[in-house]
Amino acid sequence: MIAEHLPALQVVIPLLAAPLCVLLRRPGPAWALATAASWAAFGVAVLLLIAVLEQGVLSYHLGGWEPPWGIEYRVDLANAFVLLIVAAISAVVLPFARRSVAAEIPEEKAYLFYSMYLLCLTGLLGIAITGDAFNVFVFLEISSLSSYVLISLGKDRRALTAAFQYLIMGTIGATFYLIGVGLLYAMTGTLNMADLAQRLPAVADTRTVHAAFAFLVIGIGVKAAAFPLHLWLPNAYCYAPSVVTAFLAATATKVSIYVLLRILFTVFGPVFSFEAIEFDLVMIPLALAAMLLASTTAIFQNNVKRLLAYSSVAQIGYMVLGISLGSVTGVTAGIVHLFNHAMIKGGLFLAMGCVFVMLGSVQLRDMAGLGRRMPWTMAAFVIGGLSLIGVPATTGFISKWVLVQATLERGQWFFAVLILASSLLALVYVWRVVEVAYFRPAPEGAAEVSEAPLAMLIPTWLLILANVYFGVDTSLTLGVARRAAETLLGGAA
Amino acid sequence: MRHHLVLRVIAKLLIPFILVFALYVQFHGDYGPGGGFQAGVIFAAGFILYGLIFGLDQVRKVVPPAVVEVLVAAGVLLYAGVGVASLLLGGNYLDYGVLRHDPVHGQHLGILLIEFGVGTTVAAVMITIFYNFAGRGREGR
């Protein structure tokens, strides 16, 4: 009985746990419940991926209403993979959260924090699992509203302006998405993605559908922080509590990239997106600009969280570039980088969370000599950094390798050169942190700093070691990503 | 507001009708226009009016913030709980048809409970927002 209801449980478990956290009121029990719910969601995601690998697409009719009238949860390889990413990151981040939240969030607000966190998780999982274009908007709002609250809980008062800035940008993005869905509904009379895909070709040559495409892509582009719509991201990631930064950086933008994939390949289809609209003509230059400009900006940052945030914008550029190439290899590179970058940035931001709890700052100048005082944390940062640069035997290398292959397939060796150039820029900004932490003596009279507690180190290292493991054994990541890309490209053609 | 006799009398006169109208909108929702969201806002408006006229401390005595917080969670729990109940009775999530022997009755009961959950949470959230705005800067004193 449970097996057939897995798609519903994926969303319902964190949704039920969120109000229960409010009722528990105390930080300890709320944390325990949130962690249990998140692990359960992870278990469901694993079972869903196995089920999809074995039996193909799963379709769940919410409330027993048949699609296209009712809301359908539709799980194929692409979103089963995204669900796994989101649930896995959350399952690793929550054990870390206990100490980190205790240090950064007032005790009387901690239970509300866990409740918001679970709502955000619900929203992100919901966006990924649903097969209904309007339902995506509903879950987008659930995850967005809760993430504004989560960001505003940051210790620094500037977290409030960062959250407000994100609120304005995010609301514009969500509204654009909704306008796009509304236009499509006006033209086709349906909201179900699969049904939209069938009905759209008949009306594809109308201005309304073209406008809908633009609204959808720009709306989701804001949420995905695709260059040049990324302006909300650096402040939001910089001032949010460490746990929130790690969780959102590893999941929120990834889920938006997934929605972009769905819109391009499932709803409109590659023929419309790439031949009629020539999506790639606009997006490839922007993706390349993101890789180079955001990486360059990252070099000049003095706050390590902000540095990593700009690096995220660059990494999103890689994903958009892969998708915009429009080939199976390109989309594979985009999808596999969703997974790999989630692990890289998750691990790096968790390491910064350790530093923030022990040191009280993530400013570069305060981190002098930290390599000796927090050896495990900084070692984790170094390995994560190597993966970010794309050194062989790490996940970052796999992503870039596939991406370079995809560009060469199209004969665009120039793009490949730019990818390498951007990797060199990544080397520069990672090196800046390493140099300060390892080769500069601790300043005179610096406060004594000890290594972070095991409860924080273990989750951090789990993600970092995953970077190494999936850098060597790519059968899960690359295998599933390739099959997902084939489904996306083949399914709609 | 203590000296505004007219306001106080009219408010006391109006508030019961506002609350009853909210309940009408709430339970009429499955037949006609209305539903949990609108009803929740109207219901909360009654309390907010009371707070505006008689002061924040008075309305906090009527519905203490701790109770409002529980209600925020309870509404969502009711919504999600109805879904789980239909799962346990062998239907899909939120398939109200299985809640009763007769599917039509089941659908009725289901939407009524769901809307009641929505109404509870919306009203409680509106009151919480009012408490927070009206109570700003009070903690320090």
Image (cartoon, coloured by chain):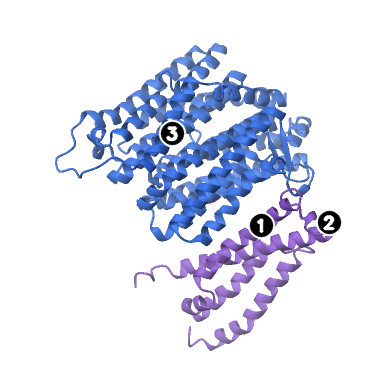
* Residue A430, position as x, y percentages in the image: 34, 28
Would you say the residues marked 2 and 3 are in contact, meaning their CB atoms lie under 8 Å apart?
Answer: no
Which residue lies at the image location 28% right of the left edge and 33% below the top edge? A375
Q: Amino acid at mark 1?
A: Gly
Amino acid carrying label 2: it is: Pro
Q: Chain of mark 1?
A: B
Left or right of residue A289: residue B29? right
Q: Colour of chain B?
A: purple
| Residue at 53% from the left image edge and 70% from the top image edge | B67
The residue lying at 51 percent from left, 86 percent from top is B4
Dot 1 surroundings within 10 Å: few (below 14), some, or many (20 or more)? many
Q: Nearer the viewer, residue A97 or A387?
A: A97
- Circle 1 SS class: helix
The residue pinned by badge 2 equals B103
**Dot 3 lies on which element?**
helix
Q: Of discs 2 and 3, which sits in the foreground?
A: 3
Quick one: A121 or A39, which is closer to the camera? A39
